[in-house]
Amino acid sequence: IRVPYPFQWGAPTFDAGEAFAMMAASFVALVESTGSFIAVSRFASATPLPPSVLSRGIGWQGVGILLDGLFGTGNGSSVSIENAGLLALTRVGSRRVVQISAGFMIFFSILGKFGAVFASIPAPIFAALYCVFFAYVGSAGLGFLQFCNLNSFRTKFILGFSVFMGFSVPQYFNEYTSVAGFGPVHTRARWFNDMVNVLFSSKAFVGGIVAYVLDNTLHRHDGAVRKDRGYHWWDKFRSYRTDTRSEEFYSLPFNLNKFFPSV
């Protein structure tokens, strides 16, 4: 029996270079987590996420990363893509299920032998599960294209170019690192190298940033382009209070909305 406690691996140390690298890694995690939040709301048959709720989720994720540093986990917290796929597979979107699962995880962390049982599951079984879970999550992203005008050549270019760059650029960075032992960006400033290499090694980050920049620069003020982008579908969900169902899906338990209000 081993109970985790803060600073069990010694007092924290601070290095500016490592801090900048972790900031870049956290930013990548936030980009990937945003996609998971949207997919979960879709699979749970909830209304589209209001920006305030999305910001609230990212803020709580930051609190989780802070606790990771206090307990010395060696890694940060990010949204589990596999859990989003599991929600789509089981169609169980209850908060109670997540709370019970969190209790089991805490229990297994204290009794290491129980955790060892799960760690002994063969890797091919996990691989088979990932094939199903990631398929569901990927389909959630593709499903949102129904709100765009796919007959528009502007939409086709942004979609194709961002997907291609999202696959090719991180692949180049990862293969370069595996062969040379360091990333393509290799200067005397290690913190700068880590920041750039971490950012451009994430497929979701590269593809998302390219699509975001192109979608907000190519003829964005044209009235017809706004409809092609599908923005008019989301106008009513830009505020927490414009849809009466937001309280049902996104209110916090234990009356915590008083301390963490949504707008």
Image (tube, rainbow, N blue to C red):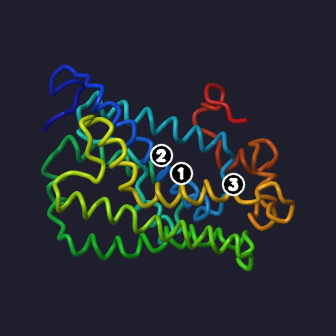
Q: Amino acid at mark 2?
A: Leu
Closest to the observer: 15 or 246?
Answer: 15
Quarter containing the N terminus = top left
* Residue 62: image tag: none
**Which mark lies nearer to you, 3 or 2?**
3
Residue at (56%, 73%) from the top-left corner?
Answer: 160
Q: Which residue is mark 2?
A: 30
Q: Nearer the viewer, mark 1 or mark 3?
A: 3
Q: Residue furthest top?
A: 11
Q: Secondary structure at mark 2?
A: helix
Few, some or many residues within 10 Å of mark 3 (<14, 14–19, 20+): few
**Quadrant location, the C terminus:** top right
Above or below, 51 relative to 66 = below
Asked if the residue under mark 2 is in contact with the one under mark 1, i.e. CB atoms within 8 Å, the reply is yes
Question: What secondary structure is found at the residue carrying circle 3?
Answer: loop
Residue 257, how many percent across, how many down?
64, 32
Residue 34, disc = 1
In the shown orientation, is residue 167 left or right of residue 70? right
Crowdedness near tag 1: few (<14), some (14–19) or many (≥20) residues, C-alpha within 10 Å: some
Residue 8 lies, in percent from the top left, at 17, 26
Visible in this render: residue 257? yes
Q: Amino acid at mark 1?
A: Thr
Q: Which mark is residue 217?
A: 3
Q: CA distance from mark 3 to mark 2?
A: 23 Å
